Amino acid sequence: MKILNIGSLNLDYVYNVDHVIQPGETEATGGRNVFLGGKGINQSMALAKAGADVYHGGLIGEDGQPFLDACREYGVKADYIRKIEEPTGHTIIQVDKNAQNCILLYGGANQMLTEDYIDEVLANFEKGDILLLQNEVNMLPYIVDKAYEMGMQIALNPSPFNEKLDMVDMKKISIFLLNEVEGGQITGLVDPDEVLEKMREMFPHAKIVLTLGKDGAKYAEGEEVYYQPIFKVQAVDTTAAGDTFTGYFLAGLIEGMPVPEILKMSARASSIAVTREGAVPSIPYREEVMEALKEA
Ligand code: RIB
């Protein structure tokens, strides 16, 4: 079984601020860093660092070479990443003194996927392989339909949640990995337990992983439901915490680990990620996560 992630690659321009800037306000920043990020590549890096064999598909500009270098360094298979004339996607991220962030996203090359490109990449995969998607690239409805026709298992992290997802046939999704806000947007509900219940009703054949921020995470599949609390740490930057959880969760699932163990490993991995700055560089390797679990 192979795993393919078709997803975004962003250069993250990260500014440390006292508080997230308000309309009309000017605030001097404490510092600026440029990190590799993008929900897509963050999740591929997390999969690879967790030990999975992952192929990444997506588009970058000439300025995106550091992503190819990082894929080589961390073991993500970059065969399907293509360079185009459009600049690489980028973000402007403010991280406040409480480690919370807000993100302004410029899609760039991430929004230039074409049917030909998707067909070319998917032709290398087959029934039973896993396709992971987020909502930072264009063509999602086409990718989902095509992969479903091929019999691939589709895992969707519907993030960031916006109206573009209305065109995606969610009944074709096998695994949802989402937070309570995204779950609320899909179900129209607020209470996390009700969100999970409604998701189970709407997608009775899907595996559902609902992350709840400081309240942990829940998993449901049919009658099976599990809960995982967070590991408390001093956070400095929460960027990519969810991506780390997603990558680790899928890696554990592919290995056939019991779900409670997968949840624990994923929660520990993301608790380490939030203690470090940046997206890709904050994601821990599996050995570190397992060591930390022994100590806990
Ligand atoms: O999930 C975190 C990511 O969201 C950042 O790396 C940023 O690029 C945005 O896409």
Image (cartoon, helix red, strand yellow):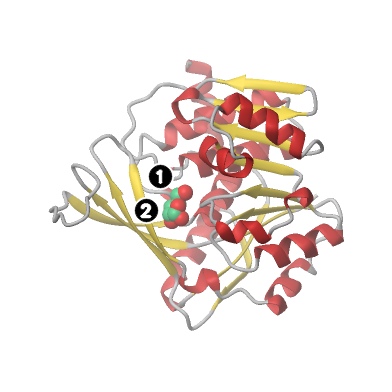
Q: Which mark is residue 69?
A: none
Q: Residue at x 56, y 75 (%)?
A: 112
Residue 203 placement, left or right of 74: right
Q: Is residue 252 visible in this depiction of the protein?
A: yes
Above or below: residue 110 compared with residue 169: below
Contact, mark 1 vs mark 2 (Cβ under 8 Å): yes
Q: Could you tell me the amino acid type at mark 2?
A: Ile
Residue 16 placement, left or right of 170: left
Neighbourhood count class around disc 2 (C-alpha, 10 Å): few under 14, some 14–19, many 20 upward: some
Q: Is residue 37 visible in this depiction of the protein?
A: no
Residue 138 placement, left or right of 32: right
Residue at disc 2, CB closer than 8 Å to ligand 1: yes
What is the secondary structure assignment of the residue under circle 1? loop
Residue at disc 1, CB closer than 8 Å to ligand 1: yes
Q: Relative to the observer, which residue lies in front, 27 or 197?
A: 197
Q: Which residue is mark 1?
A: 239
Residue 154 location, x and y as percent?
74, 51
Above or below: residue 235 compared with residue 282: above
Neighbourhood count class around disc 1 (C-alpha, 10 Å): few under 14, some 14–19, many 20 upward: many
Q: Could you tell me the amino acid type at mark 1?
A: Thr
Q: Residue at x 34, y 49 (%)?
A: 102
Snapshot quadrant of residue 191? top right
Q: Residue at x 85, y 61 (%)?
A: 149
Residue 228 location, x and y as percent?
58, 21
Q: Which mark is residue 103?
A: 2
Q: Relative to the observer, which residue lies in front, 205 or 93?
A: 205
Residue 32 location, x and y as percent?
23, 55
User: Which numbered disc flags the more N-terminal residue, 1 or 2?
Assistant: 2
Separation (CA) of disc 1 from disc 2: 9 Å
